[in-house]
Image: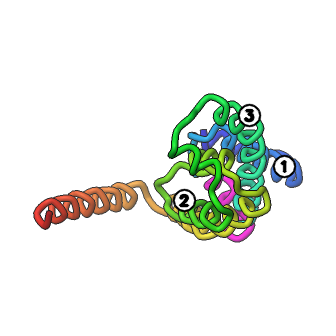
Amino acid sequence: MQEWILTFLGTVDLRLAVVISILLQVIIAILGIVPSIFITAANVAVFGVMNGFILSTVGEVLGAQVTFYLYRYGFKQPLQKRINNRWFERLFNHRQNIGYAIILQGRLIPFIPSGLVTFYASVSSISGLHFFIASTLGKLPAMLLEVLVAYGVLQLDAMYLIICLIVVVFGIFLWTIMKRKSA
């Protein structure tokens, strides 16, 4: 998929490539479960590291905001009417500063799906502006890391990538064993 996007973005007019890249990221954000790393990698390959970072960040932030409003108007009222649960009541009525902190933390942790964070925010009482600020601040470091990974993958030989993957998996395995022994 990444190669097709890379080829396509590299052959169309630069302005059209920017628009297509952003639209693809908005669609991925709406879907909520599809990773955007392949778009980020294509942006880095076609536009360079800095421009790829800026373009990917704009696409991610715009996608999150569009998704926030789609989810809010599609899920919040039906959920509030159907679910009578203390946990959901607290979720629906979060104070702005608590919701802001949860969204910021959710964006900073790389293993939490972006769609889950956006869904949480959309059914909470956080305002669109506070969601935008928290989401953007949380996405900046995550996007920087994603761009650096994409750039590294584009620059590395496949053997180096396999070695890095083995080292990471082995490190996680050792960490899990040590954690179990200390518990």
The label number, if any, that marks residue 106 in the structure image: 2
Q: Secondary structure at mark 2?
A: helix
**Residue visible at 53% across and 49% down in the picture:** 113
How far apart marks 2 and 1 lie (CA) works out to: 27 Å
Evaluate whether residue 130 shows in this view: yes
Disc assigned to residue 183: none
Membership of 171 in magenta stretch:
no
Q: Amino acid at mark 1?
A: Val
- Quarter occupied by residue 72: top right
* Span highlighted in magenta in the image: 40-52
| Dot 1 and dot 3 residues touching (CB under 8 Å) | no
Q: How many marks?
A: 3
Q: Which residue is mark 3?
A: 74
**Secondary structure found at label 3:** helix
Q: Which of these two is toward me, 158 or 116? A: 116
- Per the image, the residue denoted by label 1 is 19
Q: Which image quarter is the N terminus in?
A: top right
Is 178 placed above or below 62 here?
Answer: below
Q: Amino acid at mark 3?
A: Gly
| Residue 179, position as x, y percentages in the image | 19, 63
Where residue 124 sits: x, y (%)?
66, 50
Separation of marks 2 and 3 at Cα, in angstroms: 22 Å
Q: Position of residue 47 (x, y in %)?
A: 74, 61
Query: In 3D space, how far apart are the residues under numbered discs 1 and 3 (Cα atoms)?
Result: 26 Å
Given the image, on which type of amino acid does mark 2 rest? Gly
Visual colour scheme: rainbow
Closer to the camera: disc 1 or disc 3?
A: 3
Mark closest to the chain's N terminus, 1 or 3: 1
